[in-house]
Image (cartoon, grey):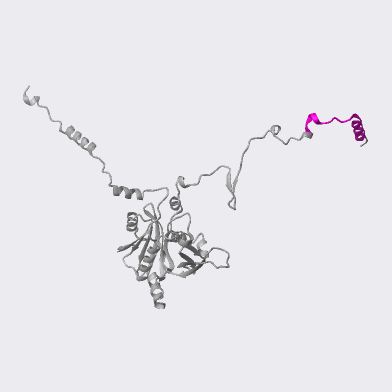
Amino acid sequence: MTKKQRKQPKAAAPRKAAKISEKAKAVKVKQPSARAARAMKKQAPKVVENTKQAIFLRGTKTSERVGGLLKDLASLRKPFGKLMQRKNPNMHPFEDDTSLEFLSQKNDCSLFAVANHSKKRPHNLTLGRCFDGHILDMAELGVEACDTLASLQLRVNAANPLAGAVDAKRLGAKPCVVFLGEAWDQPASDYKPLRSLLLDFVRGQEVAAINLASLDHVIAFTAANGKVMMRTYALKLRKPDPGAGSNVPRTRLVLSAPAADFRLRRTRWASSDLMKRALKQPRELKPTKKKNVSTTALGDTVGQIHMERQDYSKLQTRKVKALHAHKALPMAPEEEEEEEGDEEST
């Protein structure tokens, strides 16, 4: 046998495959940094969600009226709002919502407000909500008139230079929101979902109780003549009258800002199935139903008790000496005969 015949071919392919498999086993998944892990945990779903954050954006072109209103709405939303100063080209939510969804998801904001101005739709303000990284619903409002904090301060200073600063909302204060008009309760109109959207924007943080001293402003929305009128009032508390007989303070409303008149334009409301998914609550938050316990219309709790059948022969009653068997006197025989004769005569 020659040397050429003894020489065996090299098995190169299996060795390369073995090396590749060893390298694949050695590769480890890179863990996120501590900062990235905290950000991911913050955006993850929770049983009790955080307070909704709002993002306020400017379009390609904004007017002075809608720009000032956007700034005042952001001040009402503080500290749960982000006002972006840079202009965003091609920011048209009804035509293309990809950039808006990207910015909302990047800033972890489920509420958004976009200010635009054009010849076709002047002084345009778009309000909307997001769910699961996508737009849930939105409404387009035309700002026909607006009064901002800056314009109100100029008028107050012109009337009285010593009047001081206009009363504005304190940081983190809860407002008293009032909806006036029959249009808000119409089921088939656009005003009912619009009320839910406006309430989400101005209500702030959810709390179990409110201190009366911290209530410093009132926001009223009135629907009439095809318009939605928004008015903000500063709430002043005064000492109660001496002869009133109660400790409830006297209240006084002072006109503040922002104040605007809106005209409803385009809308995109969520479907019933999508809204049902968005309003779904986890099982941990649902109240556990107690058996045999109900609540009346007046709020009283009524309970039903189930007991075993009682044996009345073993029931302990009051002991009376006159009813004892050994102390009962027998009747005389004459008296018994008289009673029998009376019965026969009858």
Residue 175 in picture, x, y percent from top left: 45, 62
Please check the rendered image and state whether residue 39 is part of the magenta-colored stretch, yes or no. no
Residue at the (36%, 68%) spot, across then down? 68
Q: Is residue 325 above or below residue 267?
A: above
From the image, which quarter does the N terminus lie in? top left
Q: Is residue 265 visible?
A: yes
Magenta-drawn stretch, dominant element (helix, strand or loop)? helix
Tell me: 175 left or right of 241: left
Foreground pick, 271 / 243: 243
Tell me: 282 left or right of 17: right
Residue lying farthest bottom?
159
Total number of numbered discs in the rendering: 0
Q: Which residues are magenta?
A: 323-344
Q: Is residue 230 visible?
A: no
Residue 223 in picture, x, y percent from top left: 49, 66
Foreground pick, 174 / 17: 174
Instruction: Locate residue 310: give its quadrant.
Output: top right
